[in-house]
Image (tube, rainbow, N blue to C red):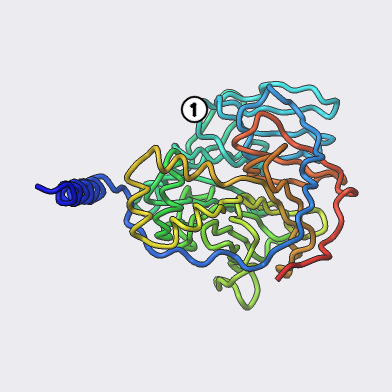
Amino acid sequence: MAPGGLFGTAAAAVVVSLAVHVLLNCPIQPVPSPPPPTAGYAPNNLLQGLEKLGEEQLSGPEDVYVDAAAGGTLYTATRDGWLQRMQPNGTWERWRFVGGSGLLSIAPSGDGSMLVCDAYKGLLRVEEGRVTILASTVEGSPIRFAEAVIEASDGTVYFSDGSTRFGIDRWFLDYMEDSSTGRLLKYEPSTGKVSVVLDNLAFANGVALSQDDTFVVVCESWRYRCSKLWLKGDKAGKAETFIDNLPGSPDNIHLAPDGSFWIALLQLRSPWIDLVTRWTFTKRVVSSFPALLDMLKETGKGAMVAQVSENGKIVRVLGDSEGKVSNFITSVTEYDGNLFFGSISSNFIGKMSLAKVPRVQDVVS
């Protein structure tokens, strides 16, 4: 056989082998991804000037809660299974042990306990000496990826289930598949009932309530938007878009003292990610090889957060475009004129004075 014929035979064998591997090993059923956001903001790299709290003492502090009634005591959950807190004098302590590596969002409850989303176990209530699983299933299906939680003034708890397809260890596969199986859930403490209030969400992430509990906002990471569900008034029960075309994938969202919201925006963008997610075929191929998938995920660099007004307009944007100091920020909380940043990939809580953060001026179309 001529060399050209041998080469052609070998190439055909490689193609067939690749096709068979993808057919047998592809873990996703992808749909076309939406176009990336078009709104751009002049880079400022303000996040590179943050102060690091608890550096080397914390493992992946994904979320932050600051207790104003306790003089600014700061709480976070870490990958080693602890709820940790920093006293106003700056000293850290391991406060409550929960166990496991899936602790994410935390929020206070009116009864003095702490509500925690465990990505593996579901919605938890943490008290001194006791951890209670409040919800691990909803309407007969497992809560696969409990993400974020908030309690309303009447005691109703709203929390998100990011995906019914993939858990926290395989979250990037959910991004690649983009099949919109996330849900906003409601837990009623008087009855213990759990129900779905919004579904078909493109990775349901952060959850926040307006100042008067008129509406609840849930972030849809893979759609670069946040949706709003009205809880009171003439629109009660109606869902609508709160903000879209965000310059990143929204993670946690927290209410600010003035009624606006702070949103952490994951920077899941790179030329390689944009190329691979353009077609379902390339999604399938890359997702079939774990090493390739990890390499692709690592090409997304940088951190960003935004302040959004109550009517869904961006007010401030802070960034670290290359991830030099902060990368993959997952939450931002405002307290007493300061911002506190959590990150599931860092070993510290970031802090920055809000006075150093100008309002948005330059918008690049």
The residue identified by callout 1 is 100
Q: Is residue 310 left or right of residue 288?
A: right
Q: Quadrant of residue 43?
A: bottom right
Residue 144 placed where, x, y %?
Answer: 41, 45
Towards the viewer: 344 or 257: 344
Does 302 appear above or below 31? above
65 and 291: which is toward the camera: 291
Instruction: Report the label total.
Output: 1
Residue at 84% across, 65% down: 361
x 9%, y 47%: residue: 1
Percent coordinates x, y for residue 319 in the rendering:
73, 50
Q: Secondary structure at mark 1?
A: loop
Tell me if I can see residue 157 in this picture.
Answer: no
* Residue with the most extreme front position: 2
Residue 219: name its quadrant: bottom right
Q: Residue furthest bottom?
A: 234
- Evaluate whether residue 236 shows in this view: yes
Q: x%, y% of residue 71?
A: 84, 35
Does residue 329 appear to the left or right of 32 in the view shown?
right
80 horizontally vs 215: left or right: left
Task: Name the quarter where the C terminus is drawn.
Answer: bottom right
User: Which residue is located at x 73 percent, y 57 percent?
Assistant: 261
- Which of these two is toward me, 364 or 360? 364
Q: In percent of the image, x 58 and y 23: which residue is there?
A: 97
Residue 279 spot, x, y in % from top left = 39, 62
- For disc 1, the neighbor class at 10 Å (few under 14, some 14 to 19, many from 20) is some
Residue 360 against residue 325 in the figure, above or below: below
Say above or below: 273 vs 91.
Answer: below
The amino acid marked with disc number 1 is Gly
